[in-house]
Image (cartoon, helix red, strand yellow):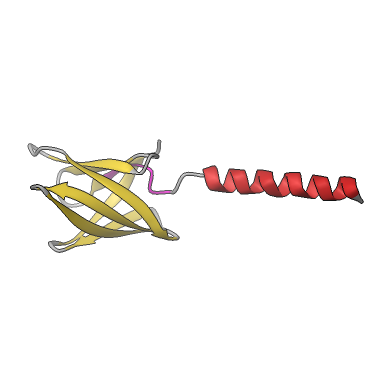
Amino acid sequence: MRTLLQATLVIAMMTLAVGCSKKPELVGRWENTTVPELIEFKPDNTGVIQGKNLPPLSFVWQETAKNTYSLDVGFQGQKKRLKGAVDNGTLVLVGEGGKETYRKVTSQ
């Protein structure tokens, strides 16, 4: 009985560790579907937005719910908040300026 309990605890701990270490679908590079812009989400919850002929914008991101994210983007000395959601391999980001759609290019 004690061995069974120990085995169950070990399996539960391994399942928890694997589940926690799984990176979100968001991690990787995404391409804007309408303008020449790439956005990269890194596993350490940082990222960069790179538009054509524009300086890169750094950001930090966090998962707020399953497949839902918030980004704090450094822009002209301020932090701008974007909200995003991933659905069927498409990322939609929404902010003060409207919304943009991205498709995944690579995973990390």
Q: Residue at x 53, y 42 (%)?
A: 21
Q: Residue at x 10, y 37 (%)?
A: 55
In the rendered view, would you say 105 is above or below 71?
above
Q: With 45 as the anchor, is 14 left or right in this view?
A: right
Is residue 32 shown to the viewer in this render?
yes
Quarter the C terminus occupies:
top left
Q: Is residue 12 magenta?
A: no
Is residue 29 shown to the viewer in this render?
no
Q: Tell how many labels.
A: 0
In the rendered view, would you say 92 is above or below 53?
below
Q: Residue at x 33, y 45 (%)?
A: 104
- Which of 23/90 is in front? 23
Q: Is residue 26 magenta?
A: yes
Q: Residue at x 83, y 50 (%)?
A: 5
How far across and how far down the image is residue 36, in percent? 15, 43
| Residue located farthest toward the right when viewing the structure as drawn | 1
- Which of 53/61 is in front? 61
How far across and how far down the image is residue 69, in percent? 35, 57
Boundaries of the magenta span: 25-30
In the rendered view, would you say 100 is above or below 104?
below
Dividing the picture into quadrants, the one containing residue 51 is: top left
How far across and how far down the image is residue 54, in percent? 8, 39
How far across and how far down the image is residue 84, in percent? 30, 59
Dividing the picture into quadrants, the one containing residue 44 is: top left
